[in-house]
Image (cartoon, rainbow, N blue to C red):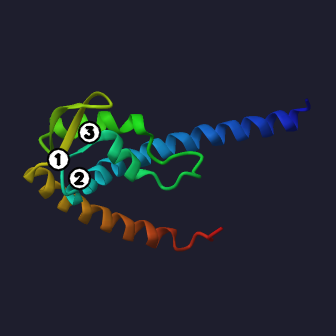
Amino acid sequence: MDDSSQSGNMAVKNAEVVDRKYRKELSAGITSLALMSILNNADEPMYGYQIAKLMEEDEKQTVPLIKHGALYPVLRSLEGNGLLASRVEPSVSGPPRRYYRITDEGAEALGRWVEIWKRTCKLIEKILGGVPND
């Protein structure tokens, strides 16, 4: 393998690492916002897998924006901050399930977060306006 192809392979691997890190950082805040919104709009408490299924973009997506396993630490953190409440119920088809609902404090936080999200999106769209689309 010559130096140029080795450099090319290293550049591709570096790009993949950088992209993966960016996706992880980006999804951290989005996950909390999405979870809170889903639970705010739900008619009844929901368990993690139900929420995860709603957060999937589509079944053809090869790299999910939010991995199922990443939801549970976020749910626990939001509950620890008083934004969600949960209860455990037995399940007929497996282990007990923890059902989450948004608290009044969580609904208030969600309202603030949505406003922050909207302002952020406006700013990013303005900044990216000069970037050519694919």
Q: Residue furthest left?
A: 104
Say few, some or many: other residues with alpha carbon within 10 Å of mark 2 (under 14 / 14 to 19 / 20 or more).
many
Q: Which residue does the numbered mark 2 point to in the structure image?
A: 39
Q: Earlier in the sequence, mark 3 or mark 1?
A: 3
Whether 132 is drawn above or below 24: the answer is: below
The residue at which mark 3 appears reads as: 75
Mark 1 secondary-structure assignment: strand
Q: Residues within 10 Å of mark 1 (few under 14, many from 20)?
A: many
Please name which of the two marks, 3 or 1, marks the residue nearer to the observer: 1
Amino acid type, label 2: Leu
Residue 115 versus residue 75 in the image, above or below: below
78 in relation to 127, above or below: above
Pick the residue in front: 10 or 109: 109
Tags 2 and 3 touching, CB below 8 Å: no
Q: CA distance from mark 1 to mark 2?
A: 6 Å
Give the Cα separation between the discs numbered 2 and 3: 11 Å
| SS for callout 2 | helix
